[in-house]
């Protein structure tokens, strides 16, 4: 186990533990930057998809993983971000202006929706946001002049600093654009978590009563969390629109909302890593399944058979498996494996077992 | 002038009068204890001061400031910090993060400056850590600094709660049963800490406690309550020998 002696407060405030950890992340970033040179267009596209999902996952992670507010409505915010971005682009705004504006619009709409939802907890909030997700479909169809209704819209190629970026024409440039957004959002998220606002999110998640007694304004904090969460989700939605090329009212269905929530649960609630791990599972699983289906088909000598609902079934099984055996998600499992190696041979089975929480002060409202 | 004054405060839950025309005042620099049988309304008094409940009548003042005009999230800002009877820590955060939440009322930065972690945010964070580190040192929490609350034993959690309340930099500290569930040794530690909090830090302490050894050891004045009303008020000896108090605890000799 590496023991780090801290000799200054700055050393404790900075996001990395020591030079070793920093260099690992820098190597990871270098690999991500070099990926277009190593991968063919198909896999690069898949990787881009995973990164976009990771942004959406970070958006939901702020709200659900760190503030403890379950949302089954985040597909609606993906949709708002996507449509806002395209509509602003169609009005002739440059991408570098339309894209952040789309995030801002989504964030503000998120706050407007959040205000009535502030008094709701747990399952009730989940149901209310689920309703939002269901409504979004109809809202898009009804506001046809703006959204194109059932026919949908097509994403135009965008220009950044004079370079034309298009998902199909220039997949490498599109990948780098997405990667840049990922890096910016991740850095912002890291900063948030080491600043007072991020800590007040965690405080609201773990105990509203004592957060209040420490001077945290619960409603205001939740509104901030909704704003940041929805804004980042809106950015992911805008990128999803550009990535898909064409979309309509059915693109951002309730299923996407559920998938997004599943993703962060599988990845590990309450950690930035969790959003990325979850995105890798959600992004690569369909490809993995279709490849292994072909492989099995070749093995038994028959044609590949279509099994309806296979993907959903496997997703469901994975989720059940995680909830039962690893509630901390992939990130939690990763922490355990790492600790096992670091402490070898002194790792104890119950090292990560948590004591049952003690009786909570009865809820006051 | 008294630091905290409750004047004729009444609180009803439906038909039950939880606090019945209660009046008392806490002087600056003293340790004031509230004792009484279970259900006497002691914790309810704390929840009234924390503004979790609105009293039906009466007034609560901090010096000249009317507490009833403030929201519960403002109370920490006025310099009142508290602990909870059934520990209410932020379970999935480290001890250090818990104490840093205690510094929340000193937050001056905006969301945008925190997202970029501007130098001003960095400076404020260093200042927060300096203050928190003093408290960690004071309460001997160094071995637990970076541990998750969820893995800590009960006795340490109790101390972390006191530490988090102190981190807010209060004038008045409300301790809700600081010694409940502690061993004899931990209770005597708590006793020295309460005395040091008053003497070294100059913080006024208002506490609810069942352990009469601790109460008579540290407190200057004791208020005995039963059924939401005041039974007796005075020095620990006076209250302990007061006939009404003995009756409330032991019943009437027939």
Image (cartoon, rainbow, N blue to C red):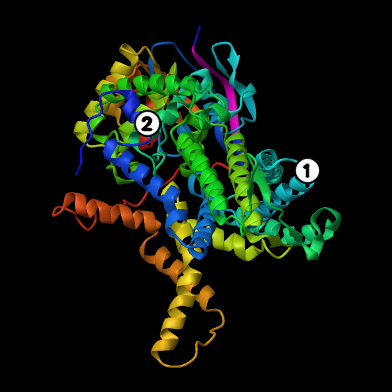
Q: Mark 1 points at which residue?
A: A92
Residue A242: image location, x then y, percent? 65, 54
Mainly helix, strand or loop, the magenta region? strand
Q: Please say whether residue A257 is visible from this viewpoint.
A: yes
Callout 2: chain: A
| Magenta-highlighted residues | B3-11
Relative placement, left or right, of A250 versus A28 is right
Relative placement, left or right, of A280 versus A220 is left
The image quarter containing residue A360 is: top left
Which of A280 and B50 lies nearest the eye of the viewer?
Answer: A280
Identify the mark at residue A14; answer none if there is no mark: 2
| A196 in magenta | no
Callout 1: chain: A
Q: Please say whether residue B34 is visible from this viewpoint.
A: no
For image coordinates 47% across by 68% down, the residue present is A285
Q: Is residue A349 above or below residue B95?
A: below
Residue A101: image location, x then y, percent? 69, 40
């Amino acid at each position: 186990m590496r023991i780090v002696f801290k000799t200054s407060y700055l050393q404790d405030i900075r996001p990395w533990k020591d030079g070793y950890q920093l260099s690992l992340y820098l190597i990871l970033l270098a690999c991500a930057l070099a990926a277009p040179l190593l991968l063919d267009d198909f896999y690069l596209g898949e990787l881009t998809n995973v990164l976009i999902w990771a942004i959406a996952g970070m958006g939901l992670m702020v709200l659900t993983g760190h503030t403890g507010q379950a949302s089954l409505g985040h597909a609606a915010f993906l949709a708002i971000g996507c449509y806002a971005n395209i509509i602003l682009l169609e009005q002739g705004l440059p991408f570098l202006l339309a894209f952040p504006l789309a995030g801002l619009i989504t964030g503000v709409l998120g706050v407007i929706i959040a205000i009535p939802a502030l008094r709701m907890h747990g399952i009730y909030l989940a149901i209310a946001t689920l309703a939002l997700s269901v409504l979004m479909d109809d809202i898009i169809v009804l506001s046809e002049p703006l959204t194109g209704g059932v026919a949908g819209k097509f994403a135009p190629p965008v220009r950044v600093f004079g370079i034309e970026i298009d998902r199909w024409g220039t997949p490498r440039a599109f990948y780098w654009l997405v990667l840049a957004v990922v890096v910016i959002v991740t850095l912002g998220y890291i900063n948030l978590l080491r600043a007072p606002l991020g800590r007040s999110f965690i405080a609201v998640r773990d105990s509203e009563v004592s957060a209040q007694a420490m001077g945290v304004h619960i409603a205001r904090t939740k509104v901030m969390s909704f704003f940041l969460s929805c804004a980042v989700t809106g950015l992911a939605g805008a990128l999803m629109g550009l990535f898909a090329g064409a979309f309509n009212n059915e693109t951002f269905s309730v299923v996407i909302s559920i998938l997004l929530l599943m993703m962060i649960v599988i990845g590990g609630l309450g950690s930035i890593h969790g959003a990325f791990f979850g995105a890798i599972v959600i992004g690569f699983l369909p490809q993995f399944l279709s490849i292994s289906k072909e492989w099995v088909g070749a093995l038994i000598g028959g044609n590949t058979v279509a099994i309806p609902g296979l993907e959903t079934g496997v997703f469901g099984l994975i989720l059940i498996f995680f909830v039962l055996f690893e509630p901390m998600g992939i990130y939690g499992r990763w922490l355990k494996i790492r600790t096992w190696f670091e402490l070898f041979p002194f790792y104890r089975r119950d090292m990560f077992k948590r004591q049952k929480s003690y009786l909570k002060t009865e809820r006051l409202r | 002038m008294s630091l905290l004054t409750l004047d004729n405060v009444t609180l009803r839950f439906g038909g039950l009068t939880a606090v019945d025309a209660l009046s008392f005042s806490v002087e600056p620099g003293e340790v004031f204890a509230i004792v009484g049988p279970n259900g006497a309304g002691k914790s309810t008094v704390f929840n009234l001061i924390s503004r979790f409940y609105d009293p039906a009548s009466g007034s609560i003042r901090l010096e000249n400031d009317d507490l009833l005009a403030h929201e519960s999230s403002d109370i920490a800002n006025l310099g009142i910090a508290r602990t909870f009877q059934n520990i209410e820590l932020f379970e999935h955060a480290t001890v250090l993060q818990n104490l840093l939440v205690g510094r929340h009322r000193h937050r001056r930065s905006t969301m945008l400056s925190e997202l970029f972690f501007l130098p001003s945010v960095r400076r404020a964070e260093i200042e927060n850590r300096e203050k928190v580190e003093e408290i960690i040192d004071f309460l001997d929490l160094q071995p637990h600094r970076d541990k998750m609350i969820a893995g800590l034993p009960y006795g340490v959690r109790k101390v972390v709660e006191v530490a988090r309340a102190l981190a807010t930099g209060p004038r008045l500290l409300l301790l809700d049963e600081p010694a409940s569930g502690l061993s004899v040794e931990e209770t005597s530690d708590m006793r020295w800490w309460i005395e040091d909090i008053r003497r070294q830090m100059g913080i006024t302490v208002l506490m609810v406690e069942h352990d009469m050894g601790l109460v008579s050891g540290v407190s200057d004045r004791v208020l005995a309550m039963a059924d939401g009303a005041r039974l007796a008020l005075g020095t620990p000896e006076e209250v302990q020998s007061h006939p009404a108090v003995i009756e409330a605890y032991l019943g009437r000799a027939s």
